[in-house]
Image (cartoon, rainbow, N blue to C red):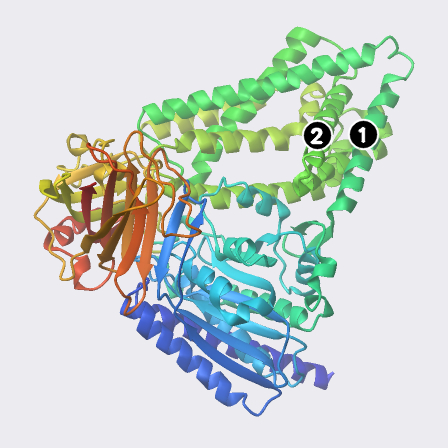
Amino acid sequence: MYVFSTHTYVHMYKLCVCNYISKRHLEQITSVGPRPVGSPENEVLTVGYLLEQIENIRVETAAGPHQLTVDVQRPTGSFSIDFLGGFTSFYDRVTNIAVRLEPKGGAQHLMLANCHFDTVANSPGASDDAVSCAVMLEVLHSLANQSTPLHHGVIFLFNGAEENILQASHGFITQHPWAKQVRAFINLEAAGVGGKEVVFQTGPENPWLVQAYVHAAKHPFASVVGQEVFQSGIIPSDTDFRIYRDFGNIPGIDLAFIENGFIYHTKYDTADRILTDSIQRAGDNILAVLKYLVMSEKLADSSEYRHGNMVFFDLLGVVVVAYPARVGTILNYMVATATFFYLAKKASLPGNGGGRYVRRLACATGVAVLSWFVTLLSVLIVALLVTLLGRSMFWYNHFYASICLYGAAATGKMILVHTLAKNLYYGVSDGLGDLFFDVSLLLWGCSLVWLTQQGLCSAYVPMLMVAFPLATRLLLSKEFKHRGASVKYSVLYLLGLALPYVHFMFLIWVVFEIFTPIMGRSGTEIPPEVVLASLVTLATIFLSSFFLHFIYLVRSTKWILAGLGSVFIIMFLLVSCGVFFPYSGNPDSPRPKRVFLQHTTRTFHNLQGQVESQDSGLWINSFDYTAIQHITPSIPELNDSVRTRCREDRPFCGYPWFLPVKFLSKKNWYLPAPEVSPSSPVEFSLLSKEETSWGTVKMTFSAKGPSHMSLYLMPHRGASLSTWSFGNGTPQFDLSGEYFVFYSHGLDAPTWTFWDPDPSGPEGMISVAISSHYFFGEDRRTSQLEEILHRFPTWAFPSSWVSTYDMYRY
C-alpha cells in the first residue's frame, strides 16, 4: 500500500513538473508577440529559443541510449493548392527546425510529429500553434530520457511557415533528405483556444493508425464524422495534414483544439487562456501515441496494413469505439435488414392485409416529411425577418438566444403540424403512436442504407439511431400495448434511447462549437442567420424523430404549444428590439468582431509604363455579415458612401488582397488617406521579353519587397497563360480569368525572379499586379492607422497593416 502511494505521488509530481515546463515554454514563445513569417520574432527570437531548449535536451540525454540530431532547414519552393478557390504558392528561405531522435545505432523508419511556431499578423498565437510546440518540446524531452531504446526514430518538426498556407511543411516533405524515411505523422493544430484536442482527420486509409490512437491515447476524443465534414470542404480551413498526405503520400493523424474559436487568430489568443489541464491532456495523448507507434512493428512495413478505412467515435471522451469500415458496412446492412424485416412483419399481420399498413405507413411518412419542410421553411422565414431587421448574429454572444428563438419555432411548428394531422386528418384512430414510431424507423433506416452505399463511415450514426430504438421498442412492446404512454413506458423508453441520443447530442454540440465561431469569419456574403437557423432546425428534426409518436399518444399538446409560442414571441421581440448585441469586449469571454484594415497606396500603369492613376486610402474589410453597421456609430465617416466597387478591368478588382478571398468579402470600404512610404518599397521590373518558338512571348520579371507579397495575373480577352515558372510549370486555378500567386520569404532572401508567357497584341494581352504587405516592424504602422484604430469600439478586433498595390499592362 505504501509503495503504491509513493509511486502515485512521484508520477503526479512528474506530471505537474512537465505541465509547468510546457506552460513555461508556451509563455516564452508567446512573450515575443506575433510571429509572422520573415519577422525577427519568428526567424530569430523563436528559432533561437527553440534551438536553445533542444540543445539542453541533447546535452542532458547524451549519455542515454538515444542520439539527437538537429537540422535548421531554409527551403525554397512552389506548389499549387485548391484552397480558397485555388492559388499558387511560392516561398523562399522559410524556416524549419527538424529534430531527429533515434537509437544510437540509427533508425531506418521514422515517425513525424509536426507543429508550427509562426502566427498570423497581430495575434500572439498561443493556441495556434505555440502550445503544440511547447508540448512537443516536453514529449521530445520525455522520449529522449527513456532508458529503453526506441525501435524506430522520430522527427520533431517545428515549422515556421504554416500560416502562409502550409509552405514550410511542403519545403520539408518535398526537399529534406530525412523525409524519405518518414512512414507516418502526427500533426498538431488548432481551430480554437484550449479544451480537448480532437482527432478530426486520419489516413488516407491505413486503419492501423486509428487503432494505435485508440489503444494508446489516455484521453481519447475522436470522430469520423468530423473527418468527413472537414474533408468535404464545408469548413474554410486546412492544415499541414494535406501537404504530408498529398505531396508526401504519407498517412497520418490530425489533431486540433476546437473550443472557443471566437478568439482564434485574434489578439486574445494568449497563453493565460490555455488551461494547464488542456496542456496536460494533449501531452499525455501525444506522448502515449508516439511511444506506441515508434515501438510498433507496423511502422516498419505500414504498406502491409495500408488498405481499408476505420469507423471511429468516442463516447463522451471516455472510450473510443473503432472498427474496420468493411465491418461497419456489414453491421449497417444487418441493422437495416432487421428494420425492414420488422416493418415487413408488421405489414403481414392479420388486420393489415391488402396493403393497409403499407398505405398508412406511406401516408404517415408523407406527413413526417411534410412537417420537416414546413418547419424548415417557417424557421427560415423567421431568420430572414431577423436579417431584414438588422439583427443578424444576435446569437454570436448569446448562443442560448438562438435556441430559444429558432429551437422554439422549430419544435413548435413540428408539434403543430402533427397535432393538426392528428385532429384534422386522422381523427380518433388507434395505433397512431405505433405507426409514427415505425415512420421514424423507416426514415432512419433509409438514411442508413444511403450513407452506407455512399461509402461514408458516418453511417454509424443512423445505425445507432435505428438499432437502439428498435431493440428498445421490441423489449417494451407489451408495456406499450397495455399502458400506452405511461410514465413507466416513458422512463424505460428514454433509458433505451440514452446512448445514441447522448452521443448524437454530443456531435451536435461539436457542430455548434465549430460553426458558430466560423460565422464570425465567413465573410459578408454568407447569411449567418440562414446557416444557424438551418442547423438548429435540422438538430430539432433529428432529435425529435423518435419522440414524434408521443404527440399521438398524449391527449392534448395545447399547453406545450402555448409554452413554446410564448418563448418564441418573447424572444423575437427581444431580438427585434436589439437586446442581444452580437459582440463583446469582455476580457473574460470576448466575442470580437473581425475587421481588416490596410493603409494602402495604389498605382496603375498604362501600356507605355506611365502612371495612369494613383490614390491612397484606408481599405477596410469586414469578415462577417453585419459589415460595418455597428462600427459606423463610432466612426461616422466609415459608411456606405465610401463602399468600393469592383473594377473588373483590374486584377482582383484593383485592391491588395492578401489571399484570394474576394468572393467571401465583396463588401469593403475605402477612406481617402495620405500616401504610404515604407522604408523598403517594392521593386518590380520587367527584366526581359523574348519570343518563343511556339509563337508566344516569354516575359521575365523581378520583384523585391517585404516578406509577404501577392501577385495577380489577368490575361485579357482572347489571351491565356500556357506555362509559367511556378509549381509544375502549368498555370492552375483560373479564378474567373485571374491567377493568384502567394509569395513569402524568410531572412536574407534574394530577389524574386519569375517568368510568364505573353501572347503579344496591339491592345496589350495581360495585366500584372503585385501587392506588398508589411506585417511587422516600423513599416506596418502609420499615424492614420493608429488614429482610426483608437476609434474602434472595444468589442472589435481590427487587424491592420500597411500595403501597396501596383498594376502594369503588357
Q: Are marks 2 and 1 in contact (CB under 8 Å)?
A: yes
Give me the C-alpha separation between circle 2 and circle 1: 10 Å
Residue 784 x %, y %: 11, 51
Using a 10 Å C-alpha cutoff, classify the residue at mark 1 as few (fewer than 14 neighbours), some (14 to 19) or many (20 or more): many
Q: Which mark is residue 339?
A: 1
In this picture, residue 561 sits left or right of residue 82: right
At a point 60% along the width and 89% down the height, the residue shown is 64
Quadrant containing the C terminus is top left
In this picture, residue 201 sits left or right of residue 32: right
Q: Which mark is residue 444?
A: 2
Vertical relation: 139 (above or below) 373: below
- Residue type highlighted by circle 1: Thr
Secondary structure of the residue carrying tag 2 is helix
Using a 10 Å C-alpha cutoff, classify the residue at mark 2 as few (fewer than 14 neighbours), some (14 to 19) or many (20 or more): many
Rendering quarter of residue 14 = bottom right
Vertical relation: 796 (above or below) 463: below
Rendering quarter of residue 34 = bottom left
Residue 633 x %, y %: 18, 37
Q: Is residue 13 visible?
A: no
In this view, the residue in front, 594 or 93, is 93
At a point 29% along the width and 50% down the height, the residue shown is 710
In this view, the residue in front, 594 or 409, is 594
In this view, the residue in front, 195 or 766, is 766
Quadrant containing the N terminus is bottom right
Residue 42 x %, y %: 33, 68
- Residue type highlighted by circle 2: Trp
